[in-house]
Image (spheres, coloured by chain):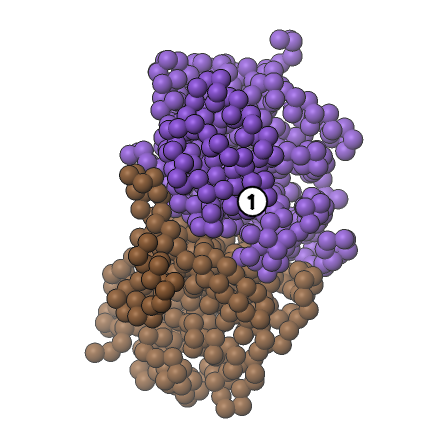
Chain colours: A brown, B purple
Amino acid sequence: MPRPLHLSAALDSPGHVDAGHYAALARLAERAALDFVTLDDSFTPEPRRPDALATLARIAPLTERVGLVPTVTTTHTEPFHTSISVNTLDWVSRGRAGWLVGVSATEAEAKAFGRRPTAPADALWAEAADAAEVAARLWDSWEDDAEIRDAATGRFIDRDKLHYIDFEGAHFSVRGPSITPRPPQGRPVVAVPVTAADLAPDASPGGRARVSTAIRYADVVLLDAPDHTARLTAATELRLRAGEHLRILARTEAALPDAAAVERLLAELAATGAGVDGFHLVPADPGRDLAALAERVVPILRARGLFRAGYAGRTLRDHLGLARPASRYAAGPAAATDSAGPAALAEVTR
Amino acid sequence: MTDRPLKQIHLAAHFPGVNNTTVWSDPASGSHIEFDSFRHLAETAERGKFDFFFLAEGLRLRENKGRIHDLDVVGRPESITVLNALAAVTTRLGLAATVNATFNEPYELARRFASLDHLSGGRAAWNVVTSSDAFTGENFRRGGYLDRADRYTRAAEFVQLAREFWDGGEETVRHQGPQFDVEGRLSLPRPPQGHPVVIQAGDSDEGREFAAATADVVFSRHSTLADGQAFHADVKRRLAAYGRKPDELKIMPGVTFTLGDTDAEAAELAAETRRAQVGAPTAIAFLEQVWGIDLSDHDPDGPLPAVDPDPGSALAQGRVRIGDPLAIAAKWRTLATEKKLTSRELVIEVTGRQSFIGSPATVAEQIDFFVQNDAADGFILVPHLTPGGLDTFVDRVVPLLQERGVFRTDYSGTTLREHLGLPLPGRR
């Protein structure tokens, strides 16, 4: 049986700062039953745009199923804030949040914060990996059943189910636990952008660091490859190194002014043997192209049995076919042997 | 009363807090984290034509005796993200987030509030708080601390810089100061309100001066008539030095309330709520905060501890600091002896008495009286129940305030500045 096709789209619309514009685009994506939409971000003055996570939170109540994946950069933002913001996006969207990990490499961004100089890409991506580690530990730091509301003892939570994360890295340390309870998806979906060049034998140190961040932390890779061969090679390599759970979506430009363009995109999306799980569509004119996608492209994919007729699940993990992870701190039967010892035992028996 | 025109009252709704004011054991208590709870309270506040909705912040879970405090509601979402989502389901209500100036940077926070202001059509407000504790700092790069004396210096420069970024438009802001040396331009046009509304809650002399210089709204804790009048007069008096008129700063104490069909019924309900707010374990935890020692074996239904507090203790973390523990203990002992109170009764007596208790008519009259007599310009109401704790107030008290001609029957503007009667700030 073929793997199900996964489709996503970028909503980026330089110059638009009004919520209505983004809400209309997200509704089009939802009509097409796309897995998720992305919104890029940075701390550069151009392009003109509002904060991406804020924008997707703003449209969360106006949509029901489509996944919401903002870029949040890790170079200047506190990892604690990133973790609770993405967590909260998951709460306000009832389990539809993701996080597209990015870094800030420009001088302009460093000056806007005035806290540290710019750093090479490999250092920035190594730090991004630390931020992803911290975010995931904080999401897990409340076990799912930590809130007990036990009137008999007056306890709102079972504090043995809240955990310090005690992360110590080269750039920051974070004690935890999170201030925000575990999000509906357990862990929101983590996406990392990777290019085929990052995977090549002569890849730059920055590219290699980006790949290793993706291998270690990504649920989804947005893969940018110049042609089919490069895409297949890169996807195969990623799959080998990360495993079957990784969803690889190939970046594909989607300018759809006319019927011929629709035909070309259909051929591209229906081609098998590309080694990817689906596509991340980047419209040239988001309003026009997302409408064409919903009205002309997706109905044909559905008629050919290549794409879902509608959403079967409610969360982004559901759409992507990714299981909800258990908290790493939950004392399951297997975990007990890992943490045996006087201190751990005292925790369990008290 | 003088014959000046009636003052118009400003009202805000505080989402029930992460402390023992909030009663989670009530069968009507809902989720403190699901979006529907925030939505319910915000929609209720907007139905009541409130000025704004308010979220507090805590960046580290509170601890007692080295362990996470488990007796109160624990856990909350990230405020600005919730407010952006609430902007989708409300159209006029102001949206205020408490955000710490110590553990954020001006460029990023200015951008986040500018985004909220754009995405909500001019309804954003920032409650500026500062922190100097290394305890919270353990969750952040900055790590520890900020010298206590530097807190307001940093906050003042932070707010000034945020306003420069908001004003920036097409121009790059270049700022060199003792706290920040930055250069940048936001990716957004000037926010619809010019500057999002700035709220300030500090009560020290420095805090009051900072409010007079900088804030649009003061979230005060002086909820009795005499204290409120003294605070109101003091802060308004400071405005002239900054070239500001008394109207340009609104003073809104945080208040609790209990409503009943009659005053007698309300008094009974209020006492019941206070017993629910201070259960036996909570009473012990309160005493431990002051005594600074482990009192888990102390009988809550017996007299206060015989030993004196340990003033140097760091037992309770992540809470507002209390004053001199020895003096507090002495005062409590006198009170307990006079009124023959057990430990728990004493805690109930000294904490959390509701600010307004009575029938809707009584409460409407009290609120109006406080405002007309300059104990406040309005109130930030703190319900004790999530999410329905404001329902009765909006259904039964607001109409009475409207009848008295002291509260709007509908919004006349679209932005929070318009609701508060604050001028659109000029571009510097």
Q: How many discs mark residues in the rendered view?
A: 1
From where the camera sits, is residue B389 visible? no
Q: How far from the left and from the top, in percent, is residue A292?
A: 38, 64
Q: Nearer the viewer, residue A33 or B251?
A: B251
Q: Quadrant of residue A155?
A: top left
Say which residue appears at 32% left-offset and 58% top-offset: A348
Residue extending farthest to the bottom is A201
Q: Name the residue located 30 percent from the left edge and 67 percent from the top edge.
A: A336
| Residue A285, image x, y percentages | 48, 64
The quarter of the image holding the C terminus of chain B is top right
Q: Residue at x 35, y 24 (%)?
A: B272
Q: Quadrant of residue B196?
A: top right
- In the picture, the quarter occupied by the N terminus of chain B is top right
Front-most of A320 and A215? A215
Disc 1 residue type (three-letter)? Ser
Q: Dot 1 corresponds to which residue?
A: B313
Q: B29 or A308: which is nearer to us?
A: B29
Residue drawn at 24 percent across, 73 percent down: A304
Taking depth in this image into account, of A167 and B43 the one nearest to the observer is A167
